[in-house]
Each structure stands twice: as C-alpha cells, then as structure tokens.
Amino acid sequence: MTTLPKPGLRPANPNFSSGPCAKRPGWSPEALKHAPLGRSHRAKIGKARLEQAIALTREVLQVPDTHRIGIVPASDTGAVEMAMWSLLGARGVDMVAWESFGEGWVTDVVKQLKLADARTIKADYGRLPDLATIDFDRDVVFTWNGTTSGVRVPNGDFIPADRKGLTICDATSAAFAQNLDFAKLDVVTFSWQKVLGGEGAHGILILSPRAVERLESYKPAWPLPKIFRLTSGGKLIEGIFKGETINTPSMLCVEDYIDALQWAKSIGGLDGLRRRADANFAAIDGFVSGSSWLGHLAVDPATRSNTSVCLSIVDPAVTALDADAQAAFAKGLASALEKDGVAYDIGAYRDAPPGLRIWCGATVETADVQALLPWLDWAFGQQKAALKAAA
C-alpha cells in the first residue's frame, strides 16, 4: 500500500494510557496547593480531607447510604486482595475471568488461598463467559470491565437479587464511566488513577451491609496481615470508612482525587463522566467501522468497553504472520506513534492478544481521540510498507 503523509493535526494531549490515565482537562499542579503536606493524616485537617474524599465519592458515584466507603492501601489490587482474604472461605466461590486481572484473582484464590471449593469460569479474550453458569448461592468474584480485553458486562441483570453468596466486583476501569448496580454488588473496588486520572497507590473499597455481616460473623482460617484487617474483636473497624486509613496515605494524592471529583461534579457528575467516555468510544467505533485493517477485540458490541478500548489488527497480511511477528508488528505501530509524540502507551497489555488499547475515559477529550485516528492509518501504512520491504 502507498504510505500516507503525516496528518497535520495532533492530539493536544497524547496521553492515552489505561492507567495511570490522563489528568482531567485543565489540570495543573496549582490544583494541589491546598494539600496539607507535612501534616499528619490524623490531624483535623488531614482527617477532614479524607472524609471529604469519601463523601464526594459517594455523591459522584451515587453509592447508597447503606454502603460503607473506605480508602485502602495498594491501589485496586490492594482493595481486591483485602476483600478476598477477609471474606472468602465461608462458602464455595465462583471465580469468573475473561482477561488478565480476572485471571490474577483466580490465581490468588486457587494457588495462594488454596480454597478447596473454588470453581473457575473463564472465557477467551474478546468474549464474556456464559454468565448463566454462575452459581450465586456461592460467592462470586468478577471484573465489571476487563481492562486488558475491553470486554465488560452490559449490566447487573445476571445477578439475582435473592443471591445467597456475596458478589465481589473489581470495578476499577468501570467506576465513574459505567453504571454500577450497587444493589447487586456486595463489594466494589477501584483505584482513582483510572477514569478520574488521579495519582496512584490508593484503592477504594465499598462494602454492602451483606458484606459487613459476613465480616462480623466469619473468621477466615488463615492469618491476616495488618494491612488486610477490616475487623477488630469481631466488629467492623468503622474508622476505616471515616477516613482513618490503615496505613499512611499520600495527602498529595488525596488532594488530587478531591480535585478530580470536584471537576466531575462540575461537568454533571456520573452522567457527565459517562457521556464523555461514550463520546470517546463512539469516535473510535466509527473509525473502526470504516477501517479495512482494524477491528474490536470485543466480539459482541453490547460488551464493548467505553474506557479501555481494545483493538485488533485484522489485515490479512498481518494475521497471516506467526504470533511473534504479529506482536512485533503491533508493537512497531505503537512505537511509531509514541516516537512522533501523538499517542503514548497504547500497545495492548502484555498478556493480551497483539493490538492496540486506547483509553477513552472521561478525562480524555474527544477532540484528541479524533485527532489521533488519522495517525493510526499513517502508522499502519508505515508498518505495512516495512513488512512488504522485508518480504
């Protein structure tokens, strides 16, 4: 094919990483000027900031008053691990996975916790497993949005209201961009470095009354490190959910999260955030629909993520290559875009099929997504020409 000239328009912000994600539009370090640096997080000012972060989370994410919200260590991973190590083992568990992070939770339950009654329900990248096979009389662990596959559950209708087990949901790339059905979710986890573009290292843990009841009535057979402990003397440690964090938080990161939440309120809250992510996805979806070489990794349109948009290279000359050569082609494409400064960090996740992953969460401007799209054709042309020359 004839190589295309470089497009004239570039994204104003080339940051399309799926985590940490782009900062909100207009962000600058000035937004952090009120952070209580050098002060104890247990002082009145530190505690007030942590409480404000929790209150704003509830408001923007529309979390019911019945649910507790806590700031916990170690990002989304810490929040998920805390939930699994503290809650699982009371009954059998169904582990549902269709991408890398879900697979990681399976590994932790099967090989680390070594639960005897753990059933795994899996699907390949690009597809959801058969959700009808999940037994909700058991506990269930799943991701709402597969960050590394671009496949999400369309809604919470597959979860029965009269379930006997707990649902533990890793919602890290769904929160603030998709509608989470809190009536169907007993544990929700996420990190604010995703859709809101906050600074990393902190996780959010949201517990329903059913999850709290389990914590207070069940003691795991294994020892729990201090960083995982949610109860003391058989009762929930309520302070965790009032800003009394288990370990020392970064007040700079907390201030950044507060800033992002206030920006979210200014654009219409959850509805405004979702509209922005949907518009970004629509721009890419329209481009893919007219492309001869690019396709969605997610097979079913109803399951396609509006945040972590994963794309496959479907050009016959590329799909005819062996696996290593396909991976090299995709990496070369992403590298060409990074070298020109138009798109950073858009290669597929290391465990995923070769391709591209473009973050379309709410902090990304649709104009930047639109400016990127012609560059995808340009980079593909460059790689295709190099492939032909090497043949």
Image: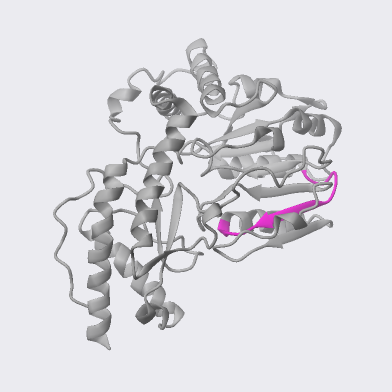
Residue drawn at x 55%, y 53% is 302
Q: Is 259 left, or right, of 121 in this rendering?
A: left
Q: Is residue 222 above or below residue 249?
A: below
Q: Is residue 14 above or below residue 56?
A: below
**x, y percent for residue 215:** 79, 33
**x, y percent for residue 274:** 46, 37
User: Which of the 4 image quarters holds residue 385?
Assistant: bottom left
Q: Is 96 colored magenta in this rendering? A: yes
Of 362 and 214, nearer the camera is 362
Q: Is residue 197 visible?
A: no
**x, y percent for residue 207:** 69, 31
- Residue at the extreme top: 44
Residue drawn at x 66%, y 60% is 129
Q: How many marks?
A: 0
Q: Is residue 221 above or below residue 372?
A: above
Residue drawn at x 65%, y 24% is 64
Q: Quadrant of the C terminus?
A: bottom left
**x, y percent for residue 269:** 46, 26
Residue drawn at x 26%, y 64% is 377
- Judging from the image, the colouring scheme is one colour
Q: Is 163 colored magenta in this rendering? A: no
User: Magenta residues, as a range?
Assistant: 88-100
Of 232 and 367, nearer the camera is 367
